Amino acid sequence: MNLRDRQRADTRQRIQRQALRLFTDRGYDATTVNDVADAAGVSAMTVYRNFPTKEDLVLYDDFDQLTATTLTELPATGSLTDRIGRTVLTILDLAATNEHDLLLARLRLMISTPALQARHLDSQYRLQEAFVSAIDPTLEYGARAAASAVLGVTHTALLRWAADNGERSLTDLFQEAFSATFGHSA
């Protein structure tokens, strides 16, 4: 990553962190994009260049691309459900370890804000597509079904993690939900 890309990433991260702080403190609906821009020390145009919609300030992450990359890097053994489960487990571990507070704040906002709940479904669809595109095209239908099932398990684990205030291990919650659903761990 060159200097320009790092600066862009730093700006994006600063904007998102300020947005999450303001949304948590003032409420999602009571906070404007101009408020976020002022708090981040950038123009509203810079906010929109990095996050095309207000919802993206909460929902944006690099997990779709990271998921596809991780899926192709992990051993292609076991069922599609197991492969996708191992991938999600790896990503959840990374997110909960490196972005614990950010992930928890994002989840709380997604759970409590109707506008974000609807957009979250779009985000889930994009993540499903990332899985499907990373798997052999001849397995598209099975990959889509497996991805949907594992994302349902993931959603359940994330909701419990947020309800528990992020105190329990997210990967343990995922493994519990995965085992309850599929009869074995990921």
Image (cartoon, rainbow, N blue to C red):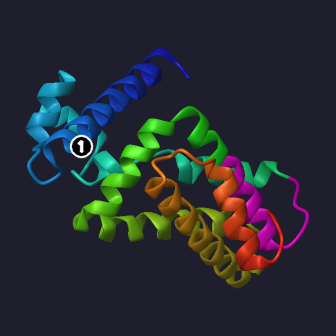
Main SS of residues in magenta: helix
Q: Provide the residue designation for mark 1.
A: 24
Q: Residue at x 39, y 19 (%)?
A: 7
Residue 24 falls in which quadrant of the image?
top left
| Span shown in magenta | 75-91
Image x and y of residue 65, in percent? 58, 49
Q: Residue at x 46, y 21 (%)?
A: 6
Quarter holding the N terminus is top right
Image x and y of residue 182, in percent? 77, 78
Q: Amino acid at mark 1?
A: Thr
- Above/below status of 75 relative to 45: below
Closer-to-camera residue (71/184): 184
- Above/below status of 101 relative to 142: above
Residue 49 falls in which quadrant of the image?
top left
- Above/below status of 167 relative to 150: above
Image x and y of residue 160, in percent? 51, 61
Q: Estimate how packed mark 1 is, as few (under 14), some (14 to 19) or many (20 or more) residues with alpha carbons within 10 Å.
A: some
Image x and y of residue 23, in percent? 21, 44
Quarter holding the C terminus is bottom right
Q: Residue at x 34, y 59 (%)?
A: 110
| 20 part of magenta stretch | no
